[in-house]
């Protein structure tokens, strides 16, 4: 319920009738179920999933459910991961993970698909660590202490033992299935969501292990502190010392987790490997983490900010009081997490700490060693996703959320718990109500729907060229908010658009990031051709339609199909 309440508070006017359109968050009415294009499959399979769901319910309802689901999934997952059965620590973790600078900035950048994976990350970490607790669903370690025996055996508290062999086998066989289910939100989100999830899941799967031969010790209240259900499994043979680690099982578990990750990544991984997309190493500088507060880039990252786009900042987050309180909160959270032990129902501790350190390292590398990261991308474009390093702070955000819950558990005070649950909202109050209007619901003008219907009803082959020749638009009917060109999502045929980016730099000036789609160069050359030759050059590239501004008379030899107040649809005759 807390996640739902935070979602309602944060989204506010965005939940009204219409679509929320901001930067990468572009939903359209009646989206067609089409496959990936020639560029990098950034919206795969999220666009297809939305299109399929929109066959049953309106697309705007799908969007609102997804946005609210991010808050609900994030809050409930963080609460479930805290090693405490007390409500206060869990609420503190839930509030922190569902209301922080990282989530706010990524939402204001429109990266809802990434946030699906971020929201599901606590559940993925919990599932990855489930092998450390035999039995899986339904049996608590507390049941062993109460009954004096493990279900399915005749063991006593004095001679603790494992589950029966058949039940142990079933539990181990179910582990990949549980992990796959937990990773479904990330799988829907696509490549960024899966990469962030893999960063946490793989080390957790490799390092998670429970204490030897007995359930986790009770917390201060005398109860088993919020363990994932089941009886702990160890990585030790009977009779081995309690702290020794065996590498073989860890490697097998990491391999099993990697196999699940790869399987769920196939929808975007296969087209990515088969595409001709290229990655510009200059993107490292363009998308490097930046200071958005008084403590510099490092301080911004420690407080889960530092995004490269200044328009994605939460109003007022750079003030001394907000940044200072968030930095103190981060310190308390890290202290609380450092005080946890794997034997206290936190078998994910080492793996999550490793993932958080790695994610922070990637963000710092982009900010302070862009040349090295750019060299890796130039050597192999597969390193391209690392250029936006700040997005890999997600495991660090989860670590801080769990750590704050653990700190509240150690203080064991209702007043402290209430304050800890309220502070994340109080230090970022302007994230509420759609970040004070930065997120709002609008509807597409009727002319967009008419053009969509005309083009999608035409059975003739050929691409649609979207002009002006740039990636983003700022329409008056959308409050002049910057969004990705909606034409890229509306039509059943391929849409040619310029995916090059111009990114402002902190010291002034702009940096151009080259397009990824190789077809962009051919279209660019055709558009520079003279009158008369321009239409013929585009026709040779397979262009059938041109969608441009209403007053654009560049294509005088093309047939006008539709003209509205804002847009104009042209068709290139086959004889050109």
Image (cartoon, grey):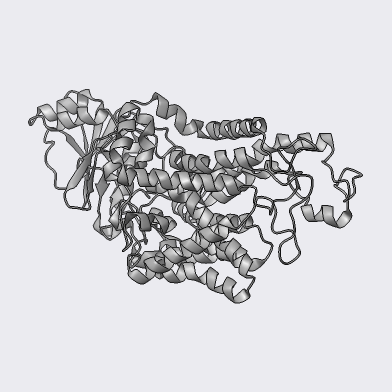
Q: How many numbered dots are placed on residues in this image?
A: 0
Task: Specify whether residue 543 is in view.
Answer: yes
Q: Is residue 120 left or right of residue 28?
A: right
Q: Quadrant of residue 298?
A: bottom left
Task: Please say if 531 is above or below 332.
Answer: above
Q: Is residue 200 left or right of residue 20?
A: right
| Spot occupied by residue 201 in the image (x, y as percentages of width and height) | 56, 41
Instruction: Name the image quarter holding the C terminus.
Output: top left
Residue at the extreme bottom of the image, as rendered: 415
Residue at the extreme left of the image, as rendered: 530
Instruction: Name the image quarter holding the N terminus.
Output: bottom right
| Spot occupied by residue 327 in the image (x, y as percentages of width and height) | 42, 63
| Spot occupied by residue 396 in the image (x, y as percentages of width and height) | 48, 52
| Spot occupied by residue 8 in the image (x, y as percentages of width and height) | 49, 65
Front one among 280 and 357:
357
Front one among 369 and 543:
369
Q: Residue at x 11, y 41 (%)?
A: 553
Q: Residue at x 74, y 56 (%)?
A: 217
Q: Residue at x 37, y 61 (%)?
A: 439
Front one among 462 and 79:
79
Task: Specify whether residue 12 is in view.
Answer: no
């Amino acid at each position: 319920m807390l996640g739902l309440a935070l979602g309602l508070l944060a989204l506010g006017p965005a939940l009204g009738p219409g679509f929320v359109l901001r930067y990468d968050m572009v939903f359209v009415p009646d989206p067609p179920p089409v496959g990936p294009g020639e560029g990098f499959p950034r919206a795969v399979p999220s666009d297809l999933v939305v299109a399929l769901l929109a066959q049953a319910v309106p697309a705007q309802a799908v969007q609102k459910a997804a946005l609210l689901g991010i808050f609900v999934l994030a809050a409930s997952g963080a609460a479930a991961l805290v090693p405490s059965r007390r409500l206060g620590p869990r609420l503190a973790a839930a509030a922190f993970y569902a209301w922080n600078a990282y989530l706010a900035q990524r939402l204001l950048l429109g990266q809802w698909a990434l946030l699906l994976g971020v929201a599901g990350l606590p559940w993925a970490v919990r599932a990855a660590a489930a092998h450390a607790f035999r039995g899986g669903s339904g049996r608590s370690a507390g049941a062993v202490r109460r009954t004096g025996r493990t279900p399915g055996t005749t063991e006593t508290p004095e001679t603790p033992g494992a589950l029966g062999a058949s039940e142990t086998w079933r539990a181990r066989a179910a582990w990949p299935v549980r992990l796959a289910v937990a990773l479904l939100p990330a799988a829907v989100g696509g490549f960024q969501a899966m990469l962030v999830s893999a960063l946490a899941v793989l080390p957790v799967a490799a390092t998670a292990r429970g204490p030897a031969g007995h359930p986790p010790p009770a917390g201060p209240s005398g109860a088993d502190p919020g363990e994932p259900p089941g009886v702990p499994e160890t990585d030790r043979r009977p009779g081995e010392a309690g702290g020794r680690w065996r590498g073989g099982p860890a490697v097998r578990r990491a391999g099993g987790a990697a196999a699940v990750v790869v399987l769920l990544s196939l929808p975007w991984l296969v087209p990515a490997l088969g595409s001709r997309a290229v990655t510009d190493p200059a993107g490292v500088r363009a998308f490097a983490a930046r200071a958005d507060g008084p403590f510099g880039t490092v301080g911004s990252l420690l407080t889960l900010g530092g995004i490269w786009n200044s328009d994605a900042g939460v109003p007022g987050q750079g003030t001394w009081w907000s940044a200072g309180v968030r930095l103190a909160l981060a310190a308390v959270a890290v202290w609380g997490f450092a005080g946890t032990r794997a034997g206290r129902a936190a078998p994910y501790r080492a793996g999550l700490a490793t993932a958080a350190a790695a994610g922070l390292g990637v963000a710092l590398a982009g900010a302070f060693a862009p040349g090295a990261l750019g060299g890796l991308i130039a050597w192999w474009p597969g390193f391209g996703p690392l250029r936006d390093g700040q997005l890999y702070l997600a495991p660090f955000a989860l670590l801080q959320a769990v750590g704050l819950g653990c700190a509240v558990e150690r203080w064991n005070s209702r007043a402290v718990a209430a304050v800890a649950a309220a502070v994340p909202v109080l230090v970022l109050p302007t994230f509420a109500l759609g970040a004070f209007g930065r997120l709002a619901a609008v509807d597409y003008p009727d002319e967009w729907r008419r053009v969509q219907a005309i083009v999608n009803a035409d059975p003739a082959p050929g691409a649609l060229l979207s002009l002006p020749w740039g990636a983003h638009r700022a329409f008056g009917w959308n409050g002049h908010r910057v969004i990705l060109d909606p034409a890229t999502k509306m039509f059943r045929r391929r849409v040619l658009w310029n995916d090059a980016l111009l990114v402002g730099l902190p010291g002034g000036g702009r940096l151009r990031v080259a397009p990824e789609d190789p077809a962009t160069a051919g279209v660019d050359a055709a558009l520079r051709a003279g009158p008369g030759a321009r239409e013929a050059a585009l026709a040779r590239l397979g262009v059938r339609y041109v969608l441009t501004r209403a007053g654009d008379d560049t294509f005088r030899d093309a047939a006008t199909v539709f003209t509205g107040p804002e847009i104009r649809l042209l068709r290139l005759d086959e004889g050109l």
